[in-house]
Image (tube, rainbow, N blue to C red):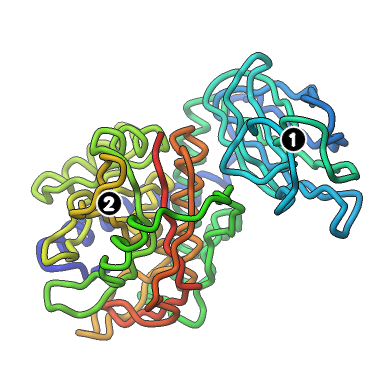
Amino acid sequence: MLLNEPSSRTSVFAFMSLALVALVFGAVTSAQTPATSAQTISAPTDKTVEIEPSQKWTDTGIDLHPGDVVHITATSSENGSSGCDPQGVMGSANAGKLPVESALPGALLAKLQEKSNSYEFVGAQRQLKITAAGRLYLGSNLASSPSCSGKYSVKIHLVPGTPNETSSYKSKLTSAAQIWLGGQFGKLNSSSTQPAGAASDAAQSAVTPASQTTATTAAVNLPISRVALDAALAKDLQTVPRRVNDEFKNPGDMVNFIIVGSEKQVQDALTAANWHAADTSTGGAVTKAILMATQKEDYLQMPMSQLYLFGRVQDFGYEMAEPYAMVASRHHFRIWKTTATYNGATVWAGAGTHDIGFEKDQRNGKVTHKIDPAVDGERDNIGQSLLEAGKVKMMSYFTPSDPVLESKNATGGGFHSDGRVLVIFLQ
């Protein structure tokens, strides 16, 4: 299997694929084999609590541990203009400074420590990845009594982290196998289960038809600022090209997000959000990938192809993926430093997409990555990841006068968007 990246990248993907496929396919078989030793894994926790917006904080009674993932969904007991909304209420008056200034009054919030002054926007739906021990508390984005009525019914689903390194390693390999095979058969879904015999059938399908591969980046509800974007900044953003291009000047991915912050702020924020800087040298990438895989370590820095904006290649490339599955599926983006600044901070332009399988490159007939055509999902996923890491001061949407709504990237893959660019101001 060859993935069509620019020539300097092709061999990396090809050899890395071959090196990791044996490990990945082995996981499918081993996943069917009963464990030789007993392992204690906590069961998921489900709980529903009612939140009074007027109440300061509600203790959910749920303890949190590193590695846990908490899924929260909330609905209001009252509809209409006077009812409280977990997303917040537009135009609602609330005296005093809100706990989260970028969110609407009454929006559902969470905090992960009893005495913490750091709050997480939840809204109607949110997934939280827990990095430190704590306890889950829920409250509303209010500084005084609410001007709306009703309660929030909040459903909490907690998935415990894996307690054992061996089971974690096997889980990673199994997940990678499912993703790789799913990409081949056009049903990329890391939660689905593929039969062990499917491995032998994979060779019969080297390319995933575009019509069969489904989008996998879930929509998120971001706490978008109510304050209008600064006019001077908006003018600068209008001058940023709408699309990047490849080495042959073919228009490619859309520029779908902006980060405002110093280079150090950007690097620190992305590291905290579990994004990995892509290796810039392909020379030792294959050896490194094989060595780390055999040592049961994660290789999450696969080299990234070079694309162009402002007539130059990206300043940085970042990626996030399931361990051992990066050949088939990864979240990734490229960022370029612009000449614009805002309040002394650098403005960075970014293009983010989510690889979800393989398809034919329309330029030359080779195999290349297929992106999730709903590119707004990846745009908002980048913002969500930085928000979860506690690195976001404010977020806004900017709609240029010439928005990109539907097009094809440089390899011929189609994508669509609402045309908005997410602007992320870092702490």
Identified by mark 2, the residue type is Trp
CB-based contact (under 8 Å), mark 2 and mark 1: no
Q: Amino acid at mark 1?
A: Ser
Q: Residue 78 versus residue 381: which sits nearer the camera?
A: 78
Residue projecting furthest to the top: 115
Residue at 69% from the left image edge and 21% from the top image edge: 135
Q: Is residue 201 left or right of residue 335?
A: right
Side of 168 relative to 257 (left or right) = right
Give the CA distance from mark 2 to mark 1.
33 Å
* Quarter occupied by the N terminus: bottom left
- As displayed, is residue 58 above or below residue 259? above
In which image quadrant can residue 356 be found? bottom left
Q: Is residue 82 visible?
A: yes
- Residue position for label 1: 140
Q: Residues within 10 Å of mark 1 (few under 14, many from 20)?
A: many
Q: Quadrant of the C terminus?
A: top left
Residue under numbered circle 2: 348
Where residue 94 appears, as percent x and y from the top left, is 73, 38
Q: Position of residue 332 (x, y in %)?
A: 35, 55
Residue 380 on image: x %, y %: 49, 56
Q: Earlier in the sequence, mark 2 or mark 1?
A: 1
158 left or right of 314? right
Residue at 41% in and 67% down? 357
State the residue at coordinates (46%, 67%): 420
Closer to the camera in the image, 283 or 394: 394
Q: Residue at x 15, y 68 (%)?
A: 6
For residue 333, what is the image quadrant? bottom left
Label 1, secondary structure: give it. strand
Disc assigned to residue 99: none
